[in-house]
Image (spheres, grey):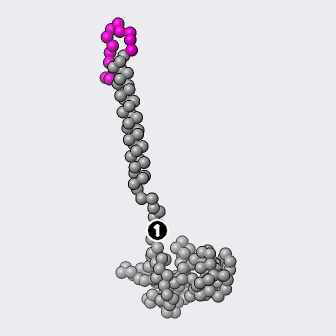
């Protein structure tokens, strides 16, 4: 070993130089461990403590995916895309009572909430159940690439259509 110091021949006492070197190595190792811990703690302390949410804007693709007189439920995004006689509009699928996800019932032509039985017409107007408000219409537009975009964070006044 290159760090090992040879004691003079005949010397039976403890190696003072060896002890110092061992002590220095242990000390430097301890300082390195403490420094690494402080760096990790400092990084965690200084990095922002926030949650990153997905964008509220949903790209629903080309409008021709939605044929006339159709209701398309996007359960992942929590929206309905309705292509009615006047154009395309989007509704929130989240019930205005306690926030359950509603379901489109094509056999009845209504939107129904499975939790407490609220029922909504295809334009979001409630006609049964405890929901206090209609399903909100959401801002809907076509971008420069011709894709239908829906902003779930922006409820609209009713009766605003995207005409295609
Ligand atoms: S959450 Fe929809 S009716 Fe209660």
Q: Which residue is mark 1?
A: 54
Residue 35 drawn in magenta = no
- Picture coordinates of residue 69, whole percent (x, y): 54, 88
Q: Residue at x 31, y 23 (%)?
A: 2
Callout 1: SS: loop
Q: Residue at x 62, y 75 (%)?
A: 98
The segment highlighted magenta reads 1-14
Outermost residue to the top: 10
Mark 1 crowd level (few <14, some 14–19, many ≥20, 10 Å Cα): few
- Picture coordinates of residue 155, whole percent (x, y): 49, 82
Quarter of the image that includes the N terminus: top left
Q: Residue at x 42, y 53 (%)?
A: 45
Report if residue 38 is visible in the image: yes
Q: Is residue 155 above or below residue 29?
A: below
- Picture coordinates of residue 20, whole percent (x, y): 35, 23
User: Residue 114 appears in which quarter of the rendering?
Assistant: bottom right
Q: Is residue 86 above or below residue 76?
A: below
Outermost residue to the bottom: 85
Q: Is residue 113 above or below residue 19?
A: below
């Amino acid at each position: 070993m290159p760090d090992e110091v040879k004691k003079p021949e005949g010397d039976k006492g403890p190696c003072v130089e060896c002890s110092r070197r061992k002590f220095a190595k242990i000390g430097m190792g301890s300082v390195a461990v403490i420094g690494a811990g402080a760096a990790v703690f400092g990084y965690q302390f200084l990095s922002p403590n926030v949650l990153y949410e997905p964008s509220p804007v949903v790209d629903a693709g080309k409008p021709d995916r939605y044929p006339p007189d159709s209701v398309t439920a996007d359960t992942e995004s929590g929206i309905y895309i309705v292509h009615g006689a006047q154009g395309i509009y989007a509704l929130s699928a989240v019930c205005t009572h306690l926030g359950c996800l509603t379901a489109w019932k094509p056999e009845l032509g209504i939107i129904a909430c499975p939790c407490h039985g609220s029922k909504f017409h295809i334009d979001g107007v409630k006609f049964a159940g405890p929901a206090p408000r209609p399903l909100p219409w959401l801002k809907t537009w076509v971008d420069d690439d011709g894709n239908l975009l829906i902003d779930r964070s922006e409820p609209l006044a009713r009766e605003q259509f995207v005409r295609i």
